[in-house]
Image (cartoon, coloured by chain):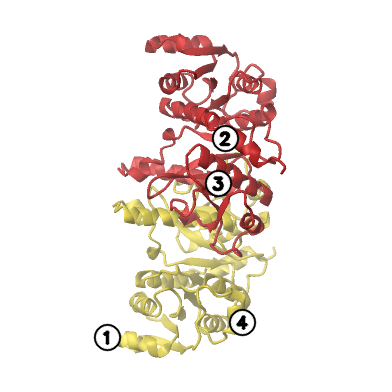
Chain colours: A red, B yellow
């Protein structure tokens, strides 16, 4: 199987991405080959520098790059030979089974929806992140920014997506799914959470355990926490800032260490017909490696089929 | 001047509240007298135990208590002789100039609006909290839960309220006001923040400095951060959980110490015609003392008049 990586995405590309590709390559199975999409001569020169054979990879040369600040839809359409556009074209055509990039998040989202398309029955794909738990292990938070405004039906679907992702990729059996809210009781919340709670309470699609609050993020109350993309993005960035603060203050603690995004590689785009992972713009080789491995795990775990089944009309 | 304190509010009342009242009393000016509202014999027996003269206070005996879990509006109406209802009645009649309680937050909000009323021109009062800044000092975040669903006009008004509060009570000159959002650019956000940004950009009512993100909460980018009560409440509780985690992990750091809510006493209800402060349910005597002193400072700083002027028709 071939796994695609955009080597032009991220603040330190292509150096960090190619170095990350080398590390990922060492952990891939014999039947798994990494396809480096981007500036082929640049990649080959980095590989030579590192004394790592180019034969370990396949290359697809592209001549354009979508910048971090570019308008996603415009860029995807206008830069047909960009590493992101070509990657999605390959994913669509089945030349690669998974695609990841630490580049423009918006372009990755738009590219996912334009190329491999949203899984039938799903209104809006979501992006998920990992939340370290205080007592060890981890949880999933979604959406973290793909959908700034959500409807109750969206949050319901995020519950299905997050539950499948936690179960298949992170091996959490029968994941506990909770709704982020501003009170524990059913009658607490904003219009969105008030309308969502009864839907979740009645569902058999996932194991709903009720509302959680901002203080419960790191507790074991829930494995999957569902929220709208605005709230989720604020939570994600606030958690990231705590990690940065703990580094600055040289706090040596295993819990804070587990906030390190490099370990997790990136945020999956859940709800589209193929594994897509978006890495942090500041990804270093370790993060790139884990991003590639996450996209591989999303494929080998059968996540996409599981999600398709969940949304198939009964 | 007489300052009212609900001695029945909070998980450790009346012991913690009366002990807090003793501490507050020591810091009040000669012309400032604390009125203890609640179970008079219980308060007197605690004071005797502490060897602190009852003459330092005035007492208003009440026979009912609004519990933490009670429905706010029902409780306020049905328990006319509760410490919260009596406190608001006294505030309305000018028998006290400020009122604070660590009791039922909803009842404190409803009580504020029912008794002293919202300041003309303000649609919805807001609750604010203190955010410690990484480089020292502090900032204000509002709304933190009074309004789970907001309109752009509400956020605009929160900007005015927060700015006046930061300037008069925390002596921050010309406070920088920012909008909590999921991107720095004007075109980023959800429907609410997208509609709010242009209003704030054009205002002369406060010093708007643009959008901030979850990661900027503890930076010096803004002194006042405005958001809806859902997002603000999630942020507040997440920040509280980080403080609790830092305690559990025995992280000794001045920054984390400044998360301690006890130092700040409580959240003001901003936008009503008198100083009202709501304390944390788990308030200890130190927190109660600071809650009382905050309500006093809100009065002596002329905050209410400043807010009234800002909302007066030109």
Q: Is residue B212 visible?
A: no
Q: Are marks 3 and 1 on the same chain?
A: no
Q: Chain for mark 2?
A: A
> Which numbered dot is residue A288?
none
B126 and B207: which is toward the camera:
B126
Tell me the tag on residue A232: 3
Q: In the image, is B109 to the left or to the right of B199?
A: left
Look at the numbered disc 3 and give the secondary structure of its residue: helix
Say which residue label 4 marks.
Answer: B77
Q: Marks 3 and 1: CB-CB under 8 Å?
A: no
Task: Give the label, 1 or 2, closer to the camera.
Answer: 2
Discs 2 and 4 share one subunit: no
The residues tagged by marks 1 and 4 sit, at their Cα atoms, a distance apart of 37 Å
Q: CA distance from mark 3 to mark 4?
A: 38 Å
Task: Select label 1 or label 4 by which is in front.
Answer: 4
Give the label on residue B51, or none: 1
What kind of element bears circle 1?
loop
Q: Position of residue A183 (x, y in %)?
A: 54, 62
Q: Residue at x 38, y 57 (%)?
A: B244
Q: Nearer the viewer, residue A10 or B197?
A: A10
Residue identified by numbered label 2: A303
* Label 2: element kind: helix
């Amino acid at each position: 199987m071939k796994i695609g990586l955009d080597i032009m995405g991220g603040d330190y590309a292509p150096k960090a991405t190619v170095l990350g590709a080398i590390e990922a390559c060492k952990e891939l199975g014999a039947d798994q080959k990494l396809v480096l999409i981007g500036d082929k001569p640049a990649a080959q020169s980095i590989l030579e520098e590192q004394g790592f054979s180019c034969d370990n990879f396949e290359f697809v040369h592209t001549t354009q790059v979508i910048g971090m600040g570019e308008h996603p839809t415009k860029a995807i359409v206008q830069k047909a030979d960009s590493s992101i556009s070509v990657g999605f074209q390959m994913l669509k055509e089945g030349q690669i089974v998974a695609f990841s990039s630490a580049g423009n998040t918006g372009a990755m989202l738009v590219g996912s929806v334009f190329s491999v398309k949203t899984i039938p029955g799903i209104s809006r794909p979501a992006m998920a992140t990992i939340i370290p738990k205080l007592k060890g292990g981890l949880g999933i938070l979604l959406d973290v920014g793909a959908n700034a405004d959500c409807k109750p039906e969206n949050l319901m679907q995020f519950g299905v997506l997050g539950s499948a992702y936690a179960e298949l990729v992170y091996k959490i059996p029968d994941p506990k799914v909770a709704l982020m809210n501003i009170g524990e009781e059913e009658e607490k919340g904003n219009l969105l959470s008030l309308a969502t709670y009864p839907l979740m309470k009645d569902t058999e699609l996932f194991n709903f355990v009720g509302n959680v609050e901002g203080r419960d993020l790191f507790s074991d109350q829930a494995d999957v926490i569902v929220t709208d993309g605005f709230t989720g993005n604020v939570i994600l960035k606030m958690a990231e800032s705590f990690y940065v603060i703990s580094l600055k203050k040289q706090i040596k603690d295993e819990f804070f260490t587990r906030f390190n995004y490099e370990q997790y590689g990136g945020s999956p785009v859940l709800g589209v017909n193929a594994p897509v992972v978006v890495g942090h713009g500041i990804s270093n080789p370790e993060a790139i490696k884990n991003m590639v491995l996450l996209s591989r795990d999303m494929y080998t775990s059968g996540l996409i089929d599981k999600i398709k089944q969940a949304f198939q009309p009964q």
